[in-house]
Amino acid sequence: MKPLVFLRTLVRTAGILAGAFLVFTGLANLSRMFLGIAVILAGLGLGALVNAALRKAGQYVPPQTVADPEARNPALRFLLQPEILIVIFGFFFNFFWEVSQIPMYEGINRGIPYFGENTVEMKLFFVQTFWRAAFLDALLLVGAHLLTLAILRERFWFSKGGRLFGVRSLAVRPWAGFVISTSICVAFLIYLEIGAFDQGLWAYSRLMPTLYTKIGLIPVGGLLVSPTLVFLLTRRVCRPGSPRA
């Protein structure tokens, strides 16, 4: 991998993961959440600057189009990029997964209970908490995708497979990418679960199966399933093709 290409992958991945962490810890701090979004955008912006340097050096390779190589509509091309599809599928799947876990918790953020209230404040709390959590999960999936891309050196690894660290003799099938991306997601979630539990951001109800008290097994189970499901849906929609001049 060329140094500038490696730098582009590094800044984008670091920006997304660091931003996702700030979004998560911003569940009780709106300014911190928006700082996380700004960090993500900054990482993508720095990646665009590296692209400019690659163009100047004559090393820039345009990204592959997806779905229909004949598509001319720029909006369609944008929506069918794998990273965009991962965010869309990841957000909706994880939003419903997050909501389904309500009985597993006694409260999130300042001990506000979930049940027994039907106030405007409670509804706003519900919306703010779960859309942020689903957005975090979607960003985590994108971060895992970019890290897997860096390891397998293939943007469409979920469809084509790839080569470990670019070594030709270490070609692997797509399932290896699913294992790598799922491992990244689960490891990151366990770290966040322990940190959030220690900070008192939530407490588990008696319905939540736990590991070492601090790690809820239901959210971990969700991230054992959602990466593969989201990447399979993305593979179903986007098929790499060669752009035409």
Image (cartoon, rainbow, N blue to C red):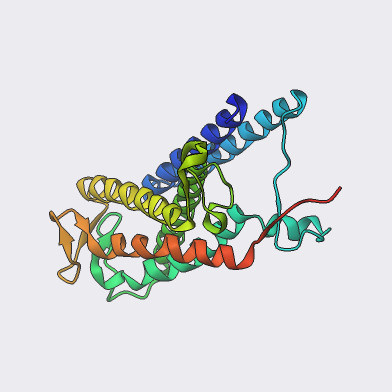
Q: Residue at x 45, y 52 (%)?
A: 177
Image quadrant in which the N terminus is located: top right
Total numbered labels = 0
Quarter occupied by residue 72 = bottom right
Q: Residue at x 55, y 35 (%)?
A: 9
Give the residue furthest to the front.
Answer: 169
Q: Residue at x 58, y 24 (%)?
A: 3
Vertical order, 60 against 220 (above or below): above
Q: Nearer the viewer, residue 113 or 76?
A: 76
Q: Nearer the viewer, residue 159 or 43?
A: 159
Q: Nearer the viewer, residue 56 or 41?
A: 56
Q: Is residue 26 left or right of residue 204?
A: right
Q: Nearer the viewer, residue 87 or 9?
A: 9
- For the question of whether residue 173 can be seen, the reply is yes
Q: Percent x, y for residue 112?
A: 28, 62
Give the residue furthest to the right.
Answer: 245
Q: Percent x, y for residue 238?
A: 64, 62
Q: Percent x, y for residue 218?
A: 27, 65
- For the question of whether residue 91 can be seen, the reply is no
Vertical order, 170 against 228 (above or below): above
Q: Is residue 239 left or right of residue 111?
A: right
Q: Residue at x 52, y 40 (%)?
A: 168
